Every structure is written in C-alpha cells, then in structure tokens.
Image (tube, helix red, strand yellow):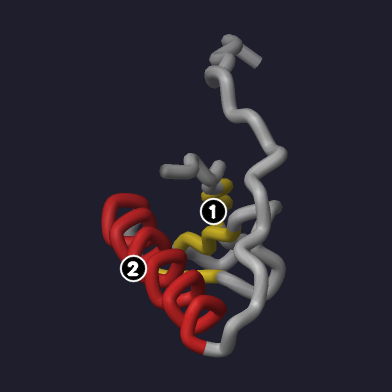
Amino acid sequence: MSTYAIIIERGETGGYGAYSPDLPGCVAMADDQDECLRLMIEAIEFHLAGLREDGKPIPHPNTVAATTFTTAA
C-alpha cells in the first residue's frame, strides 16, 4: 500500500485543481474542493491501473504531506 500526497489549489477564476507531485500528468479539476479531491482520488486509481496494465513501474511516493498551517495574514 502506498500513500500519495495530493495538492489542491484554488483557481484565479474559481474552481479547484489538484495534482500529485509523485504522479506527473495525473490531475483533476472541479467547482468545489470536496469534488476535486474525490475526482483526484479516482484519477490516481485510474492512473495506477493504467501503469499496471501497460507493465510500467509504479512510482514510489516521495512527497510527504505532514500538515497545513493557517495564519491571520
């Protein structure tokens, strides 16, 4: 079992985009953050299944997401 970090960013014109630094090209977009996360999890599962099907190596996750930090600024 592997754990892949997911980065979610808010777009300048609305909506959200997500990616995993350890899985280049695996992305998702949605109108809200929860939907974006759900779609990104599906995208990772699809991406890894495709790599397995093609006989390609599965990238080892190197990115560690420890926590978030909130400031008043």
User: Mark 2 sits on what residue?
Assistant: 42
Q: Position of residue 47 (x, y in %)?
A: 49, 75
Which of the two discs, 2 and 1, labels the residue nearer the N terminus? 1
User: Mark 1 sits on what residue?
Assistant: 10
Q: Position of residue 6 (x, y in %)?
A: 53, 47
User: Where 71 sits versus 5, above or below?
Assistant: above
Position of 66 with respect to 45 (left or right) is: right
Picture residue at 61% right of the left edge, 63% below the top: 58
Within-10-Å neighbours for mark 1: few <14, some 14–19, many 20+: some
Identify which amino acid the numbered label 1 is placed on.
Arg
Residue closest to the eye, 12 or 43: 43
Q: Quadrant of the N terminus?
A: top left
Measure the alpha-carbon separation of dots 2 and 1. 19 Å
Label 1: which secondary element: strand
Indicate the quadrant where residue 62 lies: top right
Number of the label disc, if any, that sits on residue 34: none
Q: Position of residue 13 (x, y in %)?
A: 56, 67
Residue closest to the eye, 30 or 24: 24
Q: Position of residue 52 (x, y in %)?
A: 50, 77
